[in-house]
Image (spheres, rainbow, N blue to C red):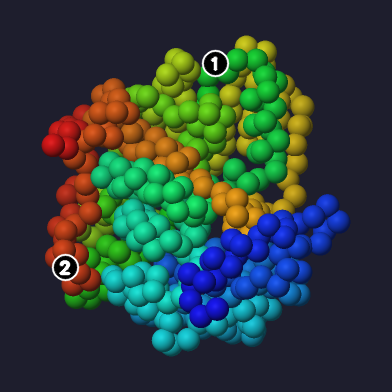
Amino acid sequence: MSSAKNRRDFLKSTAAAGAVVSATGTNLFAAAGNETIKVGLIGCGGRGTGAVRNLLDAEAKINGVNPKVEIVAVADVFKSQADNAVKSFKDPKNKAFGKYAAQIKVTPETTFDGLDAYQKLLSAGVDLVILATPPGFRPVHLEAAVKAGKHIFCEKPVAVDAAGIRKCYEMVEESKKKNIAIVAGTQRRHQKGYIETIKKLQDGAIGDIVATRCAWNGNGIWFHGRAKDEADAHYQIRNWYHFLWMSGDHIVEQHVHNLDVINWIMNDHPIKAIGMGGRSAGNESRPAGDPNQVGNIWDHYAVEFEYKNGVKMYSYCRHIPGDNDVSEAVVGTKGKCRVSSYVINNEQVATDDIDAYVQEHIDLLNSIRASKPLNELKNVTDSTFTAILGRNASYACRTLKWDDVLKSNDDSMPKNLTLEASLKVNAAPTPGSWRLPPAVG
């Protein structure tokens, strides 16, 4: 079969022979002689190359010494980043990738760079794409991948503003119509301990839930200094975490994991939020100074969310040196649960087994081969927008409603972007002075 379309059709038509691991451990997909799934990576940074390793590890657990996954193309805004990823993938001495050398089929012709590199990759005969660029690009890349009919592993978050979220919700419906698999980088939803603990909660282990809490309180983050004469757009994309149009702020980029867990437990998303926070004095990982040089994200948030049944979620996140806390907890009418510790009423109720970063790819591959594609885009879009709602409510120091924020003309992506573009950066939002943009139309 010569085309990616034929490969996808073949995958679908033969999956009925058995796509998942059987009770005896035999994988019928490999035995059925199905064609190899060809994978492309869009975004060759640490998370992107890590996702490739996780995917290859997953396939090793599924098909052992007879893998049916190949990495055939990579794309990145920066040529050096794309080239370095390929070099690592093909290095037989590389601890992460050396044993998978036979599955690396990337060539110079399928190594793409530039702001349009993702479009070139989608036309390079891939069946499955990994989207791991900075989040500001995610809605555009998601839309392109869905319209191209590709299966997707999509890192979180999926957007940084309301305009991007609206596009993602559109892609939820289109991807379902096309029978596309989309697994998100909210790996806790594939983690055995979380799955078992949350099932017990939803089965009533602590009665009706009356309050929830979550946090991602950590120390510093990476920061890249600006090179001499480096253009604004080039620098901001390279140092993406620190600029709002690229990361959405750390409540969106990082704390989305914990917010997603509470949404999962509640089987819903909040309807409103109010919060506070700010940008304190700088530190070595988030210097103070000109926002054009050091960025404009905040370093601490405290948000109160409310679900439609009246239950509150108390949310905290921080990038300031101090005690770390990455956790979720809930209180019910019959007890309490430290969700991230898998403890209900002081009793350990679950444990982990396979690395969740690997398990999510096992679940993705098996779902494709079974013609029962997992589609997590709605959940991760809900959780991403939960974070955006909390961020905007904190900027405003006002109660904001889900529907109002979703309808707003909140669109931070620069128009006609080039790597040499001049992009002036506003100062970090001043608490209480920020206002929600008016509704679209």
Q: Pointer 2: what residue?
A: 421
Residue shown at the point (32%, 28%) measured from the top left? 402
Q: Pointer 1: what residue?
A: 210
Residue 148 location, x and y as percent? 39, 63
Residue 365 location, x and y as percent? 62, 59
In the image, residue 285 sits, relative to residue 301, either above or below, namely below
Quadrant assignment, res 228: bottom left
Quadrant assignment, res 256: top left
Residue shown at the point (70%, 27%) measured from the top left? 200
Locate residue 415 relative to residue 150 in the image: left or right: left
Q: Residues within 10 Å of mark 1 (few under 14, many from 20)?
A: some
The quadrant of the picture occupied by the C terminus is top left
In the current view of this chain or complex, which residue is farthest to the top?
Answer: 333
Residue 261 location, x and y as percent? 54, 36
Locate residue 267 relative to residue 409 in the image: left or right: right
Q: Nearer the viewer, residue 361 or 237?
A: 361
